[in-house]
Amino acid sequence: MKHLLFLLLAASAFAEVKTETITIAMRDGVKLTADLYRDEAINKAPVILTRTPYDRTKQKGTGEKWAKAGYIFIAQDCRGKFGSAGDFAPYNNEGQDGFDTIEWITRQPWCSDRVGMMGGSYVGAVQWQAAVEHPPGLAAIAPQATWSSFYRNLYLGGSVRLALIAGWIAGNSPKPEGAKPNDFDEAFLRLPLSEVDSAIGWDMPWLDAFLTHPEPDGFWTRLDLTPRLPELQLPALHVVGYYDFFSRESVDNFIAMQKQARDAKTRQQQRLILGPWDHGSVGKTKTAEVEFGPEAAVDTFALQLDWFDRHLKQDAVSLSKPFPPVRYFSMGDNIWRDAQTWPPEGFQATSFYLHSAGKANTRRGDGRLTREAPTSDQPTDSFRADPAKPTPSSSVTETRPLKAAVWGPVDQSTTEDREDVLVYTSEPMTAPLTFAGNAEAKLHVSTDTPDADWAVKLIDVHPDGFAQNIARGILRGRYRNSLLKPELMQPGQVYEITVDLGPVAATIAKGHQLRVDISGADFPLYDRNSNTAEGIRGAKTAIATEQVHHKPGALSRLILPVQ
């Protein structure tokens, strides 16, 4: 009997949430479909809006949670997706459609005139796109793992995130009836790169457009929102993981809003949560092959609820609770730390210098990493970067083909057995090494081809030999001075380059070793360099002999913000 009563009460509570499917007309007459969730007992409330290209109906559980928390929740299909009319063009209409949707919401009798937006990735970017249109009533946002500059979403150091964009566009573009994609391993190796869509199986105009504009020129202007962020008067909750391909963008969005917003109050209404996650594991304890422990778990709904209670409901209890502007997870010791800014204060840029006797190839080579700079000439290290056999982003196994390379932490030791990887390793730590901030590698390099890539990974080597990547970056040689104005490399000339490794916080434990891996590719997370400088439409390749110099006057080094 008690069990039956419990079921009846549960059913009654569930029935309090009313769901209604609505259509909202945009300024050009195109109608977008949305589902509205609300508690029938509440006549007027703040509204949480999520705009998605991934099917609004999958937001049912989320919508009911927000409705039970005292909000009205609206999940809308983006233009041209699922129930919404029009044609889908990635990000092309999201600013004006977001404005029109929010304007419509604020005119409804059940809206308290305060609207918030939430969601991640594409669903996070549409928040920024709407925000810079200054829609009336938008009072707070919670963008998770997303961009404000679409070029920087796709490109790093002049290299394109090939697997990410090709896979996403293939899954979100019209294809011939019954068409199935070809083998992605082979497609990613197709040259010229401008034909990768044909290699996958059908024409994808948007992919072609993105790949054939490798510099941040006027093609990207409409989707470069970053200069407009300081105009906003808008609280924002920024959430992202170190292993997320959006980590730099999300962190930079926070920095721009906290330090550059013209409105003083807005600068105080920014919060950044940085965890040990990749794009699909936000809030979880395990990312790829590494378990970070129970402390890594985060209830993102609770974070968002507190944020919107503060800024939409303007709840007195929530407003009275102080919050640290930055909360970041330190990998290795696996604890959360609070800070006022990113990078956190109290950390000093510290150099770790590359050394060898000229044989740093593979993890069994003689590459060393120390805090002492070379005081005499050392032989140059070199490797051959063959575009036909690019260094893989992740070790290829029976269960992980080349196309399945992951951003998260996986054992790099098999990759480090390749002759085309230079490996520099410290002695085992005699005391923990803690760092937090933005890491980078300053390298002195040369090549015998007009162009070449330098891919760098920062590694924590465990006592059992597990080589955990904790940060990575890449730079295409011709973009060493400017992304907008490439300059070819002169064979044999030595250049100093800076490879951005992104935001990272970690403790290298006693007995562990710090390591730097350098190669000519990070494939297919990033496209291969043909080394010929022919560009996106070139089909020829060349094997590059790449060199790393480490001697007085050419001090190649890793720079970490050390405590």
Image (cartoon, rainbow, N blue to C red):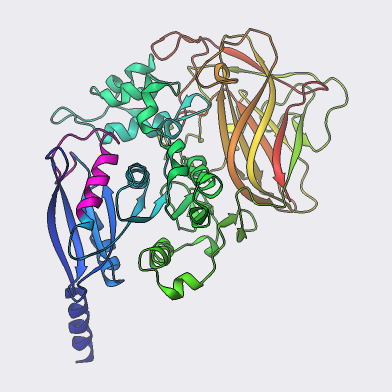
Visible in this render: residue 529?
Answer: yes
- The answer to whether residue 88 is magenta is yes
- Toward the front, the furthest residue is 263
Q: Residue at x 38, y 28 (%)?
A: 221
Q: Residue at x 40, y 72 (%)?
A: 315
Q: Position of residue 334 (x, y in %)?
A: 60, 59
Q: 338 or 45, which is in the foreground?
A: 45
Q: Looking at the image, is 366 positioned above or below residue 49?
A: above
Q: Position of residue 223 (x, y in %)?
A: 37, 33
- Toward the right, the furthest residue is 375
- The answer to whether residue 176 is magenta is no
Q: Looking at the image, is 358 positioned above or below residue 59?
A: above
Q: Position of residue 548 (x, y in %)?
A: 70, 21
Q: Report the quarter where the N terminus lies.
A: bottom left
**In the displayed structure image, the side of residue 410 where residue 24 appears, left or right:** left
Say which quarter of the image contains residue 502.
Answer: top right
Visible in this render: residue 53?
Answer: no
Q: 364 or 388, which is in the foreground?
A: 388
Q: Position of residue 287 (x, y in %)?
A: 49, 51
Q: Residue at x 76, y 37 (%)?
A: 351
Q: Residue at x 20, y 88 (%)?
A: 5
Q: 253 or 390, which is in the foreground?
A: 253
Chain part drawn in magenta: 80-104
- Toward the bottom, the furthest residue is 1
Q: Looking at the image, is 10 positioned above or below residue 116?
A: below
Q: For the image shown, how many numbered marks are present on the structure?
A: 0
